[in-house]
Image (tube, rainbow, N blue to C red):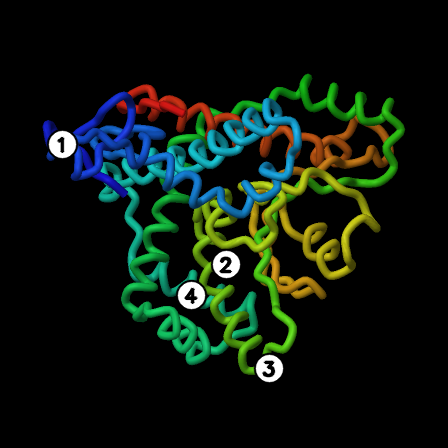
Amino acid sequence: MFYCKGLGCLVVLGGLISTSALAGERVVVDRIAAVIEDEIITEREVEKRAGPFLERVNSIEDPKVREQERRNLLLKVLEIEIGEKMVSRELKSSREMLGVGEADIDRAIEEVLRMNRLTRDKLKAALYGQGMTWSEYRTKLQEQIERARLIQYRVQGKVEVSESRVKTRCMDRQQSGATESEICAAHILFRVEAGMSVEQVDGLRAQVSKIQAELANGGDFAAYALKYSADKGAPDGALGCFGRGEMVAPFEKAAYSTPVGKVSGIVQTQFGFHIIKVTGRRNPVVGGCDTPEELTPFRNEIYQEEMEKQKELWISGLRKKAFVDIRL
């Protein structure tokens, strides 16, 4: 990452000059992808994050289509990065009002151990194996809890769901003839490689539990998917929507039992370990569209959609208040 203050950065035609330019030779060694306040993100950094996804794009034969897809991919990766940075900047100025204390962190850790069937010693061993102390882990968890609480404070009060909209959603679904619910989700895959020993698999699971805890307590799922996932279908881990029988059984069971907007525990399939975030649920109509009980699933659907919409609007507002210049 490059940081730029005043005349501390030399920029030529949107690129960064190598030190040889000081001797009279201008050589562009990298280009600026974006500037966020006083921080520069270079195109090479974005390409590095998008690397596994670029392999698929580079296989496209048509050069015009390939270049357009490459740009779209880099912009997607960059949007994930900018969104995460906007929330982080807001968090720094709002931390005192959030009131996250030691008891909140203790509860989060206990939930991690319960959901992932871990002992405290195994979790600590996994952390130390990644070069992280117990104190650093608690600090990281605190940051994620604060992030989730900040978003809740800034967004939840703006969500409105009218009864007429709920009833219309129910009636539209009734007319569609849908008889089975569908789940919309994203996931992060941690692949279990062939030949791994039982001890290595247990160690990987413990490492995944650390990440699951951070996500369950408010971590940016898209940013984590971009950084960690072995499934390179989409930078943000999005899978789209699916019905029963379309995913392997353990994945399907976990996805259908996870509430919308929440993150699952660790799920093991033949592909490896997964962390699933359920982003939506399309419910069939059971009965009619008259009683509160019949309308509740559709009210919940719309509520989650509005929460996500208001979150995006909030982040967009943060971007408007900050200096953000995209140059891709």
Kindly identify which numbered label has been placed on residue 198: 3
**3 or 4: tag closer to the N-terminus:** 4
Residue 90 appearing in the image = no
Which residue, given by chain and number where applicable, does mark 2 sit on?
212
Residue nearest the observer in this picture, 36 or 21: 21
Residue in view at x 47 percent, y 36 percent: 77
Q: Is residue 29 left or right of residue 53?
A: left
Which amino acid does the dot numbered 3 rest on?
Val
Q: Amino acid at mark 1?
A: Lys
Q: Is residue 230 above or below residue 172?
A: below
Separation of marks 1 and 2 at Cα, in angstroms: 36 Å
Tag 4: amino acid: Ile
Name the residue that disc number 1 marks: 5
Q: Decide which of tag 2 and tag 3 comes sooner along the chain.
A: 3
Q: Give the CA separation, mark 2 to mark 4.
A: 11 Å
Gap between marks 1 and 3 measured at Cα: 50 Å
